[in-house]
């Protein structure tokens, strides 16, 4: 018989996993109507630990991934969810209990020694005819885009066997997918790989370089001309780990380093800029500017004072909570023709948050509309975000959507009204967890004014645990 889950805050409330996989063919549209022409699928990923932790440790980032898919077609909605059936998932399902721990650095249980770690819990993307579930330490895992049936690990026809970030970038002009992998030469190494995959899914480029130090590199940024590799002091220090210290820890002494290279150049040309210690899980966007014969790269990022959710490297006590971690949306400008490796910073708004997104038809280009999740109510343990924000970066004007008491939002995902619609014109989707019903809703907001509330609210047959990222795949 399986054990109950322990009383850990990251396993309680809507952080707790759902244990059922289901398919619901015709969902109730409880409010409004699904817009005509909004046809496609929203895929979402997040940790959904299949068994209780091995011991006393449990980190949110290490539960096995579950994909939730909401499919819209001709005004109707359907839903299905499936765990990502990685080698780790399959071995544990066969054993009937957990083999791989959910604490960083925790040794496996007997029988788990040879099992490849892959939780595939962070993002899910559609590219080159493939649906890929991603975490940042493993290979992508392919699934059927309609049924979510497992298709197996994907190595780009054997051309790249290494780890892949959960945050690849998609060039809206070329259709290319660009991605990196950290610790690409093995655990604890500062080696980072950089890959380009063409629109058909064929890997066309793979190179390796060394970052200034080994760390957790969650995301990166691309423009139509440059690639930006921000390295933050969430360090991974083998010596510290060997002494029994934490695997990932905040070490501000090493500072922030931001590597920038031209997309058409080799990784050997990366120039490293230097800044104050901080942490960014997610950038919003970046672009390249040419002014008076000079080239600048501008990057908008959601910045924290320190890395949330991880301890201090020196063993001193730290507030590692996720809720209420101080974040701020800032704009960094890098002068590629300047003779200093410093960069400038400007705060863009006074309401911080997480999960910054944009109209991704403008990825890597100058843009105006940003979206993210934020807190506007008093902080409450286990309740991460209660408000969605639409920020007009040209005017600074902000519109917000708060679904009401006892309801919490997840990452916003933008869907254009049509292929030719102006930037930011369309719908903002999210999942709202309703504490009173202990269920989640799929919600559609009109970006004309998200504060007006949902133009459609669709009731899902289950709750969707607070997770990480998702993406919209428009109907072909
Ligand atoms: Fe992320």
Image: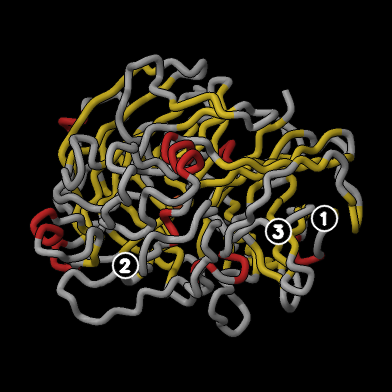
User: In percent of the image, x 69 and y 56: which residue is there?
Assistant: 431
197, 162: nearer the viewer: 162
User: In percent of the image, x 13 and y 67: which residue is there?
Assistant: 253
The N terminus sits in image quarter = bottom right
Is the C-beta of the residue carrying label 3 under 8 Å from the nearest atom of ligand 1? no
Can you give x and y, in whole percent of width and height, for residue 7 in the image? 50, 75
Question: Do residues under tags 1 and 2 come within 8 Å of each other at their CB atoms?
Answer: no
Task: Choose top left, top right, bottom left or bottom right for residue 423.
Answer: top right
Left or right of 371? Residue 225 is left
On screen, 245 above or below 411? below
Q: Is mark 2 on a helix, strand or loop?
A: loop
Q: Is mark 1 on a helix, strand or loop?
A: strand
Can you give x and y, in whole percent of width and height, for residue 343 in the image? 26, 57
For residue 310, the mark is: 2
Of mark 3 and mark 2, the one earlier in the sequence is 2
- Classify mark 3: residues with Cα within 10 Å, few (<14), some (14-19) or many (20+): many
Can the viewer see residue 131 in this picture? yes
Of mark 1 and mark 2, the one earlier in the sequence is 2
354, 114: nearer the viewer: 114
Can you give x and y, in whole percent of width and height, for residue 113 in the image? 28, 42
Q: Distance between the residues labelled 3 and 2?
A: 27 Å
- Classify mark 1: residues with Cα within 10 Å, few (<14), some (14-19) or many (20+): many
On screen, 362 above or below 253? above
For residue 433, the mark is: none
Residue located beneath label 1 in the image? 459
53, 228: nearer the viewer: 53
Pair 3/2: label in front:
3
Question: Do residues under tags 3 and 2 come within 8 Å of each other at their CB atoms?
Answer: no
108, 233: nearer the viewer: 108
Residue located beneath label 3 in the image? 463
Q: What element carries label 3?
A: loop
């Amino acid at each position: 018989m399986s054990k109950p889950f322990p009383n850990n805050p990251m396993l309680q409330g809507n952080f707790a996993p759902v244990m059922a996989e289901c398919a619901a063919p015709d969902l109730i549209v409880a409010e409004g109507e699904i817009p005509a022409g909004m046809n496609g699928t929203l895929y979402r990923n997040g940790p959904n630990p299949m068994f209780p932790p091995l011991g006393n440790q449990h980190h949110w980032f290490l539960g096995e991934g579950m994909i939730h898919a909401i499919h819209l077609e001709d005004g109707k909605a359907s839903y299905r969810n499936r765990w990502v059936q990685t080698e780790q998932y399959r071995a544990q399902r066969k054993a009937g209990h957990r083999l791989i721990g959910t604490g960083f650095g925790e040794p496996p249980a007997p029988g788990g020694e040879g099992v490849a770690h892959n939780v595939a819990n962070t993002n899910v993307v559609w590219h080159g005819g493939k649906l890929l579930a991603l975490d940042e330490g493993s290979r992508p895992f392919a699934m059927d885009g309609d049924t979510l049936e497992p298709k197996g690990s994907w190595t780009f026809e054997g051309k790249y066997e290494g780890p892949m970030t959960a945050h690849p970038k998609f060039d809206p002009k070329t259709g290319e997918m660009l991605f990196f992998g950290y610790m690409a030469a093995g655990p604890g190494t500062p080696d980072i790989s950089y890959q380009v995959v063409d629109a058909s899914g064929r890997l066309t480029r793979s190179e390796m370089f060394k970052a200034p130090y080994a760390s957790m590199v969650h995301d990166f940024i691309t423009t139509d001309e440059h690639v930006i590799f921000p390295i933050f002091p969430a360090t991974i220090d083998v010596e510290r780990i060997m002494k029994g210290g934490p695997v990932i820890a905040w070490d501000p002494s090493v500072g922030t380093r931001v590597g920038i290279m031209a997309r058409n150049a080799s990784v050997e040309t990366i120039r490293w800029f230097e800044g104050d210690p901080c942490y960014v899980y997610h950038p919003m966007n970046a672009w390249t500017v040419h002014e008076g014969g000079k080239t600048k790269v501008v990057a908008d990022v959601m910045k924290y004072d320190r890395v949330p959710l991880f301890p201090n490297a020196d063993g001193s006590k730290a507030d590692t909570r996720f809720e209420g971690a101080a974040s701020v949306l800032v704009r960094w400008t890098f002068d590629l023709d300047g003779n200093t490796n410093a960069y400038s910073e400007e705060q863009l708004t006074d309401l911080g948050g997480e999960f910054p997104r944009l109209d991704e038809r403008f990825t890597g280009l100058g843009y105006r509309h940003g979206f993210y999740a934020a807190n506007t109510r008093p902080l409450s343990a286990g309740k991460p975000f209660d408000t969605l924000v639409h920020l007009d970066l040209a005017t600074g004007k902000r519109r917000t959507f708060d679904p009401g008491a006892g309801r919490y939002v997840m990452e916003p995902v933008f869907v254009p009204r049509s292929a030719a619609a102006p930037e930011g014109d369309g719908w903002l989707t999210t999942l709202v967890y309703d504490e009173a019903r202990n269920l989640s809703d799929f919600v559609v907001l009109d970006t004309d004014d998200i504060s007006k509330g949902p133009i459609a609210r669709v009731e899902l047959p289950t709750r969707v645990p607070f997770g990480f990222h998702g993406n919209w795949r428009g109907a072909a």
